[in-house]
Image: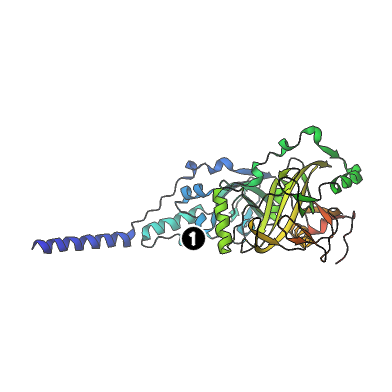
Amino acid sequence: MTQQILNNHVHRTLIGLFLLVVTGCASFTPMPLDQVPFMERAVTQVKGEVRVTAAVLSEDETEQVFDLDLYNKGIQPIWLEIENKSTQGYWFVRRGVDPDYFAPLEVAYMNHYAFSSDANAQMDRFFYEINLGNHIPPGSTRSGFVFTTLDEGTKSVSVDLFATDQQIRSYTFFIPVPGLKIDHREIDIDAIYPSKEILRYTAEQEDEFRKAIESLPCCTTSKDGTEMGDPLNLVILGKEKSDDIYHAFMRAGWDETETIHAVSAFQTGISALFGSEYRYSPVSALYVFDRPQDAAFQKARGSIHLRNHLRLWITPIIFDGYEVWIGQISRDIGVRFTTRTVTTHKIDPDVDEAREFLVEDLAYSHGLMKNAYVKGVGAASIDEPRQNLTGDPYFTDGYRLAMWLSSRMVSITNIEFLDWERPPER
């Protein structure tokens, strides 16, 4: 009899546990927005009578607000507030923020619990209600979230509003997202050169400026400066004291690079081992002006072995209100073993191809104002190539490409070409 009672008790306990799981042991407890400090990093733009405020949640903030690990699923929430003080209505277009955005109930469904219908229903309702609607009536303020694909580092956010009078208002934000240790964020540009070392040229001193950038170093070097590396084939100009250069690259889909630290080194090793993508992979240090690059960007494909990447160094030259950077770009096409570094990326020996890709890419993404060719490293033929520091051969027509970049969108038909030098036709 005692054994039967014990068996019945165990049976009831198991049934109770099963019903607890089936009916919903999971809970969904998002945190109120005013308890998460992401709004401290919000940025605002005002055009006429319409104000737009945007904030991008970090991974930790996302978990607090949504009680879910959205970053792990490649989802990044953006909070927007649109205040319309005008007498006409506006329509907000989510696709302008991200053509691959996630619908609110799609995000909820992707995170549903296996056996918790009540929590799932609560989740559906929550995501439905925090979504930013399309219509912004006259005299109203609307706020809510848009769920975008994940971008770490700096997030580029475009907000397009269509008015009932057929006018369009566009707002572009570049918002740092906490998490990654980005290389150029740790560079104090103002501390590199004392003011007395800055060389300033006016627009009327164009010839002197050309000579100045042609006389810049030809190539990157080893740390001790005794060996020559990749050719310096770029000159990049951006408005003084602005982020024009960074923003133009980000609009074109270039990713910032992380500094080398334990986590980034480990992730680089894993990506190299399995050939997976690592959009923010650190790049090795090359030297100009006796220092490693001040900034680096990359445009990765599906594998860490395949990418375009570039390094930039700010120079002590200011031309007509534009800071001048010298740079190097090449295309990684694979990985090979070396006695010097064990493994290294194999570059496309035609380094001019990567240079031309960059000007086309920036033009099509509306970040290029004008460009010109200037003399640089000097020609090296395909039959008699030079070598970089890891022994990869390269050939070039020897010219540098100077590009004036803009944070504001520039139509491809308005790009100005300065006829300074003409590389040979190929």
Q: Is residue 133 visible?
A: no
Q: Quadrant of residue 359?
A: bottom right
Total marks placed:
1
- Circle 1: element type: helix
- Asked whether, in this view, residue 301 is left or right of residue 120, the answer is right
Q: Residue at x 37, y 53 (%)?
A: 27
- Asked whether, in this view, residue 83 is left or right of residue 394, the answer is left
> Residue 316, position in %: x, y?
79, 40
Q: Residue at x 66, y 64 (%)?
A: 334
> Residue 235, position in %: x, y?
80, 50
Q: Which residue is mark 1?
A: 105
Q: Quadrant of the image for the N terminus? A: bottom left
Q: Nearer the viewer, residue 345 or 105?
A: 345
The amino acid marked with disc number 1 is Leu
Q: Nearer the viewer, residue 15 or 200?
A: 200
Please tell me how crowded label 1 is: few (under 14), some (14-19), or many (20+) other residues with Cα within 10 Å. Answer: some
> Residue 307, position in %: x, y?
67, 60
Q: Is residue 387 visible?
A: yes
- Asked whether, in this view, residue 281 is left or right of residue 247, the answer is left
Image: 212 above or below 6: above
